[in-house]
Image (cartoon, rainbow, N blue to C red):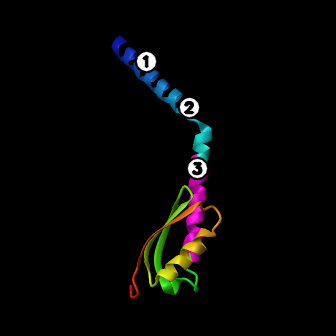
C-alpha cells in the first residue's frame, strides 16, 4: 500500500511539473500567433474572393494561401500579362507584405 501511495505522489508531482511548465508559455507569443493566423485566414479569403471576380476569373485558374502576410498563388494563367495583372491586384490587398506567384502560363489550360 505504501508503494502505491508513493507512486501516486510521484505521478502527481510529475503532473504538477507538467502543469507548471504549461503555465510558463508566453501568453503574448500565443496571442500573436493566434492573431497572425486569424489575419492570414482573413487575407486568404480576400485574395480568393478577388481571384473569383468577373474581370479576373476568365483569365486564370489559381488558388491562393497566405502565411505570415505572404500570399502564394498557384495554378495557371492564360497570358503573362494576365498573371502580372493578378499579382498587381492581389498585392493591393491589405495585410499582404509580399505576393509569390508559382503560376504557369498556359494559353489553353
Q: Are marks 3 and 2 in contact (CB under 8 Å)?
A: no
Q: Nearer the viewer, mark 1 or mark 2?
A: 2
Q: Position of residue 77 (x, y in %)?
A: 45, 80
Mark closer to the chain start, 3 or 2? 2
Q: Across the whole image, how many numbered discs are drawn on residues?
A: 3
Residue 48 spot, x, y in % from top left: 54, 72
Q: Is residue 22 above or below residue 11?
A: below
Quarter of the image with the N terminus is top left
- Kindly identify which residue carries mark 1: 9
Tell me where the magenta segment starts and ends, as one range. 33-50
Residue occupied by mark 3: 34
Circles 1 and 2: CB distance less than 8 Å? Answer: no
The mark that comes first in sequence, 3 or 1, is 1
Instruction: Choose between 72 and 43: the one closer to the eye.
Output: 72
Horizontal and vertical percent for residue 89?
A: 60, 74
* Residue at 61% over, 38% down: 27
Q: Nearer the viewer, mark 3 or mark 2?
A: 3
Of residues 19 and 85, the one nearer the viewer is 85
Residue 23 tag number? 2
Tell me if mark 3 has few (under 14), some (14-19) or many (20+) residues whose alpha carbon lies within 10 angstroms of its own: few
Mark 2 or mark 1, which is nearer the start of the sequence?
1
Amino acid at each position: 500500500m505504501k508503494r502505491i501511495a508513493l507512486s501516486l505522489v510521484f505521478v502527481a508531482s510529475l503532473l504538477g511539473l507538467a502543469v507548471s511548465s504549461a503555465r510558463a508559455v508566453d501568453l503574448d507569443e500565443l496571442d500573436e500567433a493566434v492573431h497572425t493566423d486569424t489575419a492570414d485566414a482573413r487575407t486568404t479569403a480576400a485574395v480568393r474572393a478577388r481571384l473569383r471576380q468577373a474581370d479576373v476569373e476568365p483569365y486564370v485558374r489559381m488558388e491562393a494561401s497566405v502565411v505570415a502576410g505572404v500570399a502564394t498563388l498557384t495554378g495557371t494563367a492564360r497570358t503573362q500579362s494576365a498573371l502580372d495583372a493578378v499579382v498587381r491586384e492581389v498585392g493591393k490587398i491589405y495585410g499582404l507584405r509580399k505576393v509569390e506567384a508559382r503560376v504557369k502560363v498556359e494559353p489553353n489550360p
